[in-house]
Amino acid sequence: MMNKKNLEVYVHIPFCARKCAYCDFLSFPGNQQMQREYTEKLIEEIKCQSAKVKEYQVISVFIGGGTPSILSIGDMAAVLHALKEAFEILPGAEITMEVNPGTVTAEALSCYREAGVNRISMGLQSADDKELRYLGRIHTYDEFLKSYQRVRMAGFDNVNVDLISAIPGQTLESWKNTLKKVTMLKPEHISAYSLIVEKGTPYFDRYGEHGNMEKCHSLKSLPDLPDEDTEREMYYLTQEFLNEQGYERYEISNYSKNGYECRHNIGYWTGVEYLGLGLGAASYLNGCRFHNTPSLDEYCSARLDQEEAFQRVLRQEFEQLTIEEKMEEYMFLGLRLMKGVSAHGFVSNFGHNIRSVYGMVLDAMEEEGLMEYKDGYYRLTSRGIDISNYVMSRFLK
Ligand code: SF4
């Protein structure tokens, strides 16, 4: 029998109770009818897309958003059932669901678990209620705690908590307090990102290059962002504190207890192919990159069983990558991992020795003390991690 190729599946649920002020993801509030219609279309998509990936076996599923836990239990159960029917999901595959502390019930959690979800990712962001309000989150820290207990009571033993540092008004002390409170709960995994002020968000109007106070009347009273020095201190504190608490940093912004690295994300950073399902979801299949339409109307009204509509709605910005682009991506993503890029993996993926392609850049980066070679992997040094954008850009044409 022919060996099947590995595939990761991402499912996008674009609805949120309310839009957070810093968020530029494809997400928006949606009423129950919208959610119902979306679920039906998503299930139709799952069936149509599965026919195109028969030569693959699924090694991980990530249901993200938006806020997946906002869907009714019945709708989410139907989505999970459709995924199982449509794809060859390997036994033991990692199946993650993102939940928002303000939206998840014990009943929903046990339904997810019964349906095969074995990892929960919770967006906390901060343990300080004032900071949560500044971010526009719908939950308090206390509500998060209750949800966290429900997650554990439902039997989940693989839980991620998302955190954000450099929030308006945040001090080194309050960030340390967030880290302390969260590590006391002993989640298996912590993602800790620094806030990025993205264009098109209310935060950008308030804090962007030319902060436009007129446009963001409601955010006028928000304190300033921490200055660059404080942000740097927060960044170093994160590593130091989480390491002390037994979390290993395995990617620039991700930490885990031993053996609990997020397999879905590692797959993404090491070039495993992925199929995105749902609004705006991106895919990388057979060396081609494309994404689904980001328009809810277009998505929900499409006749996906007709090839023309399928291609138009689910294969947008279709792009066949050249071998050079694939190599660049492999380096660019792989260098995010602390382990680095495997020299052996490079040969088996591309049939070329990594040094024959990138020897000059690798030597230059090593000379500058930004990269090193160890046990078959090229990786960033701690100085290289600090200026990772610069190092990664050196691998792009
Ligand atoms: S809950 Fe997440 S996806 Fe939804 S608006 Fe807030 S940050 Fe964005």
Image (spheres, helix red, strand yellow):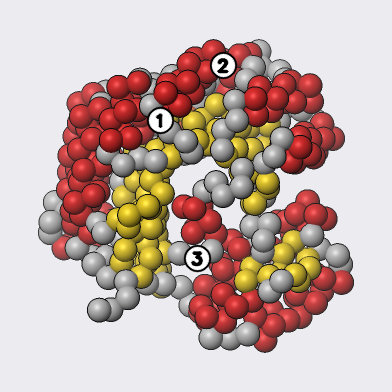
Residue 279 seen by the camera = no
User: Which amino acid is tagged 2?
Assistant: Tyr
Residue 332: image location, x then y, percent:
62, 64
Name the mark on residue 380.
none
Q: Could you tell me which residue is drawn at 68 percent across and 70 percent down? A: 377
- Residue tagged 2: 141
Residue 289: image location, x then y, percent:
41, 64
Image quarter where the N terminus lies is bottom left
User: Which amino acid is tagged 3?
Assistant: Gly
- Residue tagged 3: 271
Q: Nearer the viewer, residue 380 or 92?
A: 92
How busy is the neighbourhood of tag 1: few (under 14 within 10 Å), some, or many (20 plus)? few
Would you say 172 lies left or right of 17 here?
right
Q: Secondary structure at mark 1?
A: loop
The answer to whether 239 is drawn above or below residue 58 in the figure is above
Marks 3 and 1 close (CB-CB < 8 Å): no
Q: Secondary structure at mark 2?
A: helix
The span from disc 3 to disc 2 (Cα, nearest Å) is 36 Å
Residue 168: image location, x then y, percent:
69, 23
- Residue tagged 1: 155
Q: Reading the chain from its start, which is encountered first: label 2 or label 1?
A: 2
